[in-house]
Image (cartoon, coloured by chain):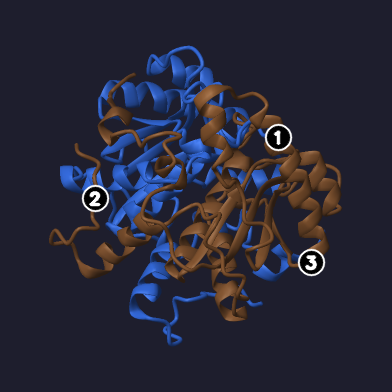
Chain colours: A brown, B blue
């Protein structure tokens, strides 16, 4: 196995299949390329509809999407994220510290929209089919919805940036989430000038991509 | 917002975009439709390559894929899953118990292959960029890889069924996972006779799909 550009290099695949794989390869975690241009209502509905069509354990569909456009809310979140950036930066030394100082970690104010994806563990409870043995299975479902959203946005020519430098309690309180509802992601969503061909963290030398062959095992570990 | 068949109904979208949304709509959680036909090596590599091209927190790529073909291993897993099915069934009464008795929860022996997707929290540690405030962020990355795999398989005409009736310790021991490596999913992967148009659990009346509008909120909860 080589793991390089599979399916996206014109090697005799059906055009629709090739186009599908191209979306997966084009997808990036966007920070610096947001233009701030608003997203059309139809396009936004398609992207959210894609998220909502994800599989979920016991068909529980435990996700919700809070669309944040309000500038003040985004500024308050951005300020919190800056603080958490500093918390992480303070754990680094030497080359890592230097590298990290150049890496942009969010586009909260530059993107048109924040989409906060939440998890409601009580939905469909207590008898959630497929969750009795694995408590986190509902959380997994929410992530499947996020990836659907991310890919649909990419297919539409939009960009998505997942911000994870925050404390859940802060974001829950900022958006008035009821007790028990857990924020899973703040996604910056919006028009972009371009999608980079290389992930930011790879370009900055933070980490490299593993070869696929290193990730595949046979029969047992 | 209506949330019905968005983007997949020929409403003037570009053909590639429409084809992309069609994959998302066609995707099902397969139990009964596996044919057992083996998967071609190139196709399998494309599907695993799709999973491996998912985004991950700090580019940690914390997933691995254990491919299980061995019949005896699959039989032992299937036996364990049957036991867990009974554990769940014993919590149900009345109509729910009757409904559940008709629902098939896995295709472990019928599908060509089991793909066990695992999570390694130590990969890239301790300084995983974007994980200091949210411990589960690495687990989220693994789920994004799973959804990429699921969609790629669907685009290829294969089926995927996520089995979640198991105890993590059992599966970890069955596959000899090292201490700390956590199994996140057993995915049945294989050729299918067809993909159902309606999710099994909806068809059986276990749960219905929520309208998209119920899942979307503005500015705050």
Disc 3: CA contacts within 10 A as few (<14), some (14-19) or many (>=20):
few
**Residue at 67% over, 34% down:** B134
Label 1's element?
helix
Vertically, is B88 above or below A129?
A: above
Residue that mark 3 sits on: A70
In terms of image quadrants, where is residue A116?
bottom right
Q: Are marks 3 and 2 on the same chain?
A: yes
Coordinates of residue A56 in the picture (x, y in percent): 57, 49
Which residue is label 2 attached to? A6
Q: Determine crowd level at label 1: few under 14, some 14-19, many 20+ residues with C-alpha closer than 10 A.
A: few
Q: CA distance from mark 3 to mark 1?
A: 25 Å
Q: Is residue B121 visible?
A: no
Query: Which residue bears the numbered disc 1?
Result: A86
Residue farthest to the bottom, as pictured: B12
Please tell me if label 1 and label 2 are on a single chain: yes
Please state the horizontal and vertical placement of residue A202, each as a whole percent of the image: 41, 41
């Amino acid at each position: 196995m080589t793991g390089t550009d599979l399916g996206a290099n014109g090697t005799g695949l059906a055009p629709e299949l090739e186009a599908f794989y191209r979306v997966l390869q084009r997808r990036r975690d966007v920070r610096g390329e947001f233009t701030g241009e608003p997203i059309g209502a139809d396009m936004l509905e398609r992207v959210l509809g894609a998220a909502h069509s994800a599989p979920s354990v016991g068909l529980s569909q435990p996700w919700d999407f809070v669309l944040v456009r309000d500038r003040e809310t985004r500024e308050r979140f951005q300020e919190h994220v800056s603080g958490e950036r500093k918390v992480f930066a303070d754990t680094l030394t030497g080359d890592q510290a230097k590298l990290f100082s150049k890496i942009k970690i969010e586009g909260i104010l530059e993107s048109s929209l924040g989409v906060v994806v939440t998890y409601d563990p009580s939905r469909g409870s207590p008898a959630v089919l497929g969750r009795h043995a694995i408590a986190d299975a509902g959380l997994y479902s929410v992530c499947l919805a996020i990836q659907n959203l991310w890919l649909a946005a990419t297919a539409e020519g939009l960009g998505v940036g997942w911000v994870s430098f925050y404390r859940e309690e802060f974001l829950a309180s900022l958006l008035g989430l009821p007790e028990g509802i857990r924020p899973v992601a703040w996604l910056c969503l919006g028009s972009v000038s371009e999608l980079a061909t290389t992930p930011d963290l790879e370009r900055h030398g933070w980490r490299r991509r593993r070869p696929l062959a290193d990730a595949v095992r046979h029969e047992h570990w």
